[in-house]
Image (cartoon, grey):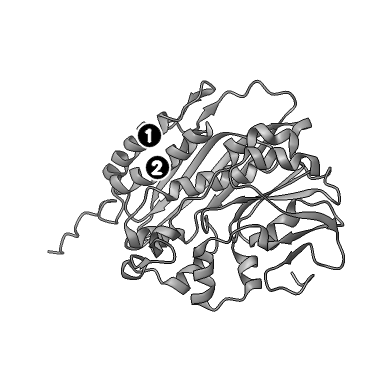
Amino acid sequence: MPKTSAKQTYAGAGVDITLAAQAKRHVARLAQSTTRPEVLSGVGPFGALFEFKGYRKPVIVSSVDSVGTKTRIAIALGKYDTVGIDIVNHCINDIFTCGAEPLFFLDYIGIRVAAPERVSAIVSGLTAACKEAGCVLIGGETAQLPGVYHGDDYDLVGFVIGVVAKDKIITGREINTGDAVIGLPSNGLHTNGYSLARRVFGETAAKLNRHSHELGKTIGEALLEPHTSYYRQLKPLLPSIRGMAHITGGGIVGNIPRSLPDGMAVRLDSTQWTVPPIFRLLQRKGNIETKEMYQTFNMGIGMVLICAPEKTGLIIKRVPGAKLVGEVVKQKGDARVIIDGAGYRRDKI
């Protein structure tokens, strides 16, 4: 008689629906803590419902991004509660550059096995950052993909939806030569440049847990510092701001031009702000050129504001750590970001 083949199951193929359901119950409880009166249905139904009201000529603003390879550091250290903060704050900062208020957030977690404690730790970071911004964690997806992710691998992607009144959109069109450029401090790499950082520092627990006297903490702790949110502190100052640039992938050099009108550039004086020790250590240990550092990392400035000169004092007084770091100038040649005082020849960035 022919052998009877073993019965196949989804769990046997690596996808445990029972485990996923348990994780989703934890997620739903955490997400509920971020709700707002406009939410008609949150986590659970096939589509989340948010009642839109209270805005004159509203414009919807959206953004999507990923934590990227910062997850590799979190995996090596077994720490999962900060990457959620990273992705929420990253996305909110992005839409805030045009003056938008974040309304709700959705996440995507791709993972080999949806272990409830790991998923809950990730979502605890999401909810903490959402609550801080008054933004609803309204839904998301946790996908168990054993054929795609291996070991403890996972990916975290965030989607934010916000709104701004049409006549309040910050477009940068009002920016003029002579306007002030203000830098707001970052607390580290935020969520960019980790492929290079991992190459320099390594990504094993043994290497990341080494204490650095220069940093006053371990390498891993410095690399996992959460992405700073600028939304709460800047929201009351929006009428005084003509342009904003969130310093993410592409560094200072790549992001500031995104907020400038054609024909304008900025001249920055790098002696006016302090570059955090993690960047100095990274540059020295990796033998990285200064130009490469400014094109890859935020170098201690997580957000750039552009305002009329007479508004500078108000903003610096109201925002902790804010520094006047430069001015808007007419563009000459291809350069749109000119950095003095950092070992550069002028107009070479």
Residue 339 x %, y %: 73, 65
Question: Is 237 rendered above or below residue 250?
Answer: above
Is residue 197 shown to the viewer in this render? yes
Q: Place residue 296 in its image quadrant.
A: bottom right
Q: Residues within 10 Å of mark 2 (few under 14, many from 20)?
A: many
Callouts 2 and 1 close, C-beta under 8 Å: yes
Q: Which residue is mark 1?
A: 30
The residue located at (63%, 37%) in the rendering is 318
Q: Which residue is mark 2?
A: 123
Q: Nearer the viewer, residue 229 or 36?
A: 229
Tell me the amino acid under the disc marked 1: Leu
Q: Is residue 16 left or right of residue 129?
A: left
Is residue 137 shown to the viewer in this render? no
Residue 300 x %, y %: 58, 57
Question: Is 342 rendered above or below residue 231?
Answer: below
In the image, which disc is placed on residue 2?
A: none
